[in-house]
Amino acid sequence: MTRKEKMDLLLSKVAEDKKEAFVAELRAAKTPEERLKVAKKYNATLTEDEAKAFQADSTNKITDADLDKAAGGCCSRCGCYCGCG
């Protein structure tokens, strides 16, 4: 599972009007435990199979750029995800 697929999966579990706050809190989380608390707070819980797929490559970290892409990303036509818009 790619990093983008992981973020898309998590975001699919969050209510549309809460996604921006979810991403912000997820970015602020410093540890896996804090990220888990954020996910639970926003009801972004995974099924057992989803969790196994999500953890299959634990070295595949989700970056801020990945969060931007999953949360709508760059608004410019270039699609560079630089926040230039």
Image (cartoon, rainbow, N blue to C red):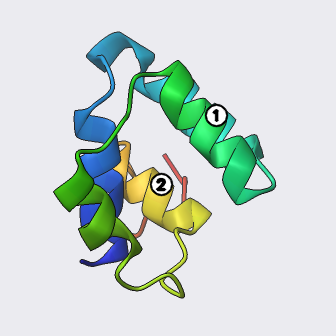
Q: Mark 2 points at which residue?
A: 67
Q: Nearer the viewer, residue 56 or 42?
A: 56
* Label 2 vs 1, first from the N-terminus: 1
Residue 37 quadrant: top right
SS label for mark 1 = helix
Residue at screen point 25% across, 71% down? 53
On the question of residue 77 being in view, the answer is no
Where residue 24 appears, x then y in whole percent? 63, 35
SS label for mark 2 = helix
Picture quarter with the N terminus: bottom left
On the question of residue 45 being in view, the answer is yes
Residue at screen point 28% across, 78% down? 2
| Circle 2 or circle 1, nearest the eye | 1
Q: How crowded is mark 2: few (under 14 residues within 10 Å), some or many (20 or more)?
A: many
Question: What's the distance in space between the residues labelled 2 and 1, CA to CA?
Answer: 17 Å
Q: Name the residue under label 1.
A: 37
Name the side, left or right, on which 62 lies relative to 70.
right
Kind of residue sitting beneath label 1: Lys
Residue at screen point 28% across, 18% down? 16
Where residue 33 appears, x then y in whole percent? 71, 49
Check the image and report above or below for 36 versus 37. Answer: below
Check the image and report above or below for 83 versus 62. Answer: above
Where residue 58 appears, x then y in whole percent? 50, 81
